[in-house]
Amino acid sequence: VQLQASGGGLVQPGGSLRVSCVVSGFGLDALTIGWFRQAPGKEREGISCIGNSGGTTFYSDSVKGRFTISRDFAKNAASLEMNSLKPEDTATYFCATLGDCWGPSSFRAPLDWGQGTEVTVSS
């Protein structure tokens, strides 16, 4: 499985941005996709995931209510719509495959990683 994240950039506080994760080598309907982020000098944080069946989703408290994860089977891609962005959302965002999407523990053992995309929230 190969994953490639894209869509990062510079956005002002309060703005929106959409990052996407294109999957190749495997059908998205058989995969659970997770989004992580890592800010400079900080630990990696699992922020959202979407399950392979039924569309089960999870959001960390830091992004709940502002971010929305979705899947596009035609594009074999998962996306993260990020609204009401804050400076503290500045980080490199990565997508990965997970074993499940039940909660925070689901992010402990990611299976396959993609390259990250940088998001900067600044005025």
Image (cartoon, rainbow, N blue to C red):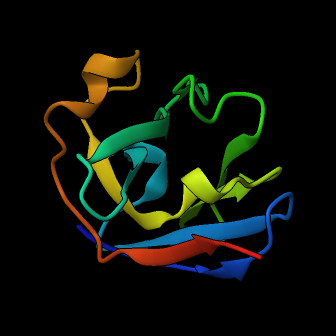
From the viewer's perspective, is residue 97 above or below residue 99? below
For the N terminus, the quadrant is bottom left
Left or right placement of residue 24 versus residue 51 in this view: left
Left or right placement of residue 26 versus residue 69 in this view: left
Q: Quadrant of residue 113?
A: bottom left
Look at 47% across and 38% down and name the residue there: 47
Q: Quadrant of residue 19?
A: bottom right
Look at 82% across and 64% down and name the residue there: 16
From the viewer's perspective, is residue 84 above or below residue 49? below
Q: Is residue 65 visible?
A: yes
Q: Is residue 72 visible?
A: no
Residue 14 drawn at (x, y percent): 86, 57
Q: Quadrant of residue 34?
A: top left
Residue 115 drawn at (x, y percent): 30, 77
Look at 24% across and 58% down and name the residue there: 41
From the viewer's perspective, is residue 120 above or below residue 108? below
For the C terminus, the quadrant is bottom right
Residue 48 drawn at (x, y percent): 50, 37
From the viewer's perspective, is residue 67 above or below residue 2? above
